[in-house]
Amino acid sequence: MRVIAGKYKGAKLISPRGEVRPTTDLVKGSLFSMLEAKGLLRGAACLDLFCGSGALGIEALSRGAESCVFADMDTRNAAVNLDKLKIPCRTIRADFRKALRMLRYERFDLVFCDPPYKSGFAEEAFGLIVKYGMLGATGIAVLEHDSKNDLINVPESCIIDKRVFGVSAFDFVRGDSESDICGNI
């Protein structure tokens, strides 16, 4: 695994061992090219939830995001990668529910949510993000999930784009806590 483009291009990242499914470089490259084309990265405040190695947040920082918070049950790999690249960022080692509760007063432009597939955590995390009003006015959550399963508790009207890369699907979701459309998950 490596950083695809930007300031840290080519840097090799360590990833968690065991039953993990890191986002491949090809998929990550496509995802971030799209985010850049939509102007969503430059100066963005990001949250990398279920961060694992921190690859998504680090890629965002490499391509011009202003800041990123990394949260996961085990942030050791992300911390090693951030230290190796000398990126000063906050890491939160906690269950996603606790991490979101801790961050509930912060606002993010981009939230990357890449939980274990078929866990239901993407939908639950998005519900909490909306409940806490964590997305800025133009904020987007990028929810990664198994392409064979749609996110059943995320209203279709909240999904602004969807991309499928083999077994992985990315839903680009807006979440307006003031809105009945996306706020009642």
Image (cartoon, rainbow, N blue to C red):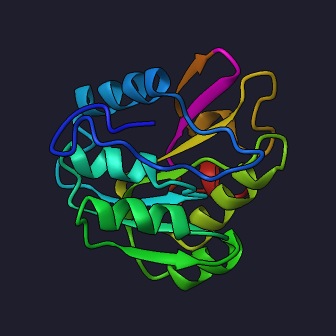
Quarter location, residue 102 = bottom right
127 sits to left or right of 8: right
In magenta segment, residue 168: yes
Task: Looking at this view, name the residue that lies furthest to the top.
Answer: 166
In magenta segment, residue 169: yes
Residue 173, position in %: x, y? 53, 41
Q: Is residue 26 above or below residue 153?
A: above
Read off the magenta span.
166-174
Residue 155, position in %: x, y? 69, 40
Residue 149, position in %: x, y? 81, 28
Residue at x 51% of width, y 54% of height: 53
- Would you say residue 177 is visible in this rendering? no
Residue at x 58% of width, y 33% of height: 171
Residue at x 61% of width, y 47% of height: 114
Residue 167, position in %: x, y? 70, 21
Q: In this view, does 76 lie above or below 150?
A: below
Q: Is residue 171 above or below residue 103?
A: above
Question: Is residue 52 or residue 150 the one in the foreground?
Answer: 52
- Would you say residue 165 is visible in this rendering? yes
Name the quadrant of the C terminus.
bottom right
Quarter location, residue 46 = bottom left
Question: Is residue 27 or residue 45 the one in the foreground?
Answer: 27
Question: Is residue 150 or residue 131 the one in the foreground?
Answer: 150
Residue at x 26% of width, y 35% of height: 10
Predominant SS along the magenta part: strand
